[in-house]
Image (cartoon, grey):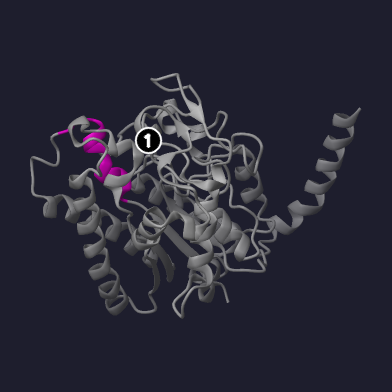
Amino acid sequence: MAASKVVPFFLIFISFALPLIRAGKPPKPASPALFIFGDSLFDPGNNNYINTTTLDQANFRPYGETYFDYPTGRFSDGRLISDFIAEHAKLPLIPPYLEPRNKLLRQLMINYHGVNFASAGAGALTETFHGSVIDLKTQLKFYKREVARLSKKIGHANATNILSTAVNLFSIGTNDYISPFLLNSSVIQSQSHSQYVQMVIGNLTIVVKEIYRRGGRKFGFLNLGNLGCLPGLRIVKPETQGECLVEASVLAQLHNNELNKLLPKLEHNLHGFKYFLYDFNQSLARKITQPSLYGFNEGKKACCGIGLFNGIYSCGGKRIVKDFVLCENPSKFIFWDSYHFTENVYKQMADEMWSRGPNNLKKFFQ
């Protein structure tokens, strides 16, 4: 009985909505739209809809247990930084680009708030976890499709208005630097660290410029944390007895240095380009070294996993190693699993991004 009532209501809704859609009525969002690119820090579940493995998926328990009470595909116990930014901006949580229901809503152009293209495991380099994730170049391709669809649906001028006021949020690079250690690849040994970092930064630059060409003007970036101190990388070399993996940390610092140089150049060369850079590195370092100041009891060990620091990537028991342990209170931990963070960390970081200091993300939404 319930289903028979829902379908006619939906058809009635469509019958009223379609004339507006055909007439090309532009949406009137209460806040600038949010376009999200990157990796697992931002992926709300796009990897649920691609042909990949559970190494790059989080659509099983205990992922999502804290806030959603079910696994959404987010690599955390709850919400991500991008979710909290959306909440701060008075937007709904931006759903995955590949989610079928989201595709329908975007076609209807009702309450348009943006798109999330992020994919867990993605890198700026196409080669990073190739074939298992949606790399940054492919995310750009999806963005271009969305721009073309917007222009066709509501007209070039209305689409340009959405794109020029939208905030484009990026979290990318981590997987480019950790994948060689996890896959025992020689790609980093075949060239200098500087050359490798330049490849990553170069690909990011291309994507940013392409978005700018299509009307994007406001950009938010996260630099990289101390990658060698992720629980999953602390155990890569047993002889170090759990110390941070220095090589990965060096690459992350080189990346951050180059990103610091790149963004002012883009601001100088691209008229109207505005950017916000969040120091993820320093924020995470403060929490790891003094966890109690931020309400945490544990700064090195993951809540979910097994082995030293729970660094073996087994959370949920759906990956290569099936055994795992789960902490009682994730909010007291910085790390959720071997490579990802708890909702509490993401909330604190999003709060810092939104309103800490004169240079903050809130300005982009006003």
Quick one: 271 or 290, which is closer to the camera? 290
Which residue is drawn at the image coordinates 57% and 54% (left, top)? 83
Choose top left, top right, bottom left or bottom right for residue 131: top left
Residue 243 image point, x, y percent: 25, 42
Secondary structure beneath label 1: helix
For this rendering, which residue is in front, 351 or 140?
351
Q: Residue at x 37, y 31 (%)?
A: 132
Can you say which quadrant of the picture contains the N terminus?
A: top right
Q: Residue at x 33, y 54 (%)?
A: 225
Camera-nearest residue between 288 and 216: 288
Any magenta on residue 175?
A: yes
Kindly indicate the quadrant of the structure image that contains residue 30. bottom right
Q: Residues within 10 Å of mark 1 (few under 14, many from 20)?
A: many
Query: Of all residues shown, which one is farthest toward the right?
Result: 1
Residue visible at 66% across and 48% down in the picture: 105
* Span highlighted in magenta in the image: 173-185
**Quarter holding the C terminus?**
bottom right
Vertical relation: 108 (above or below) 5: below
What x and y, as percent, mark residue 348?
52, 59
Residue placed under numbered mark 1 in the picture: 309
Residue 12 visible in image: yes
Percent x, y for residue 10? 81, 42
Give how far across and how far down residue 141 sits, in percent.
Answer: 39, 48
Which of these two is toward me, 121 or 267? Answer: 121
Q: Is residue 43 magenta?
A: no
Q: Main secondary structure of the magenta part?
A: helix
Q: Is residue 32 left or right of residue 186?
A: right
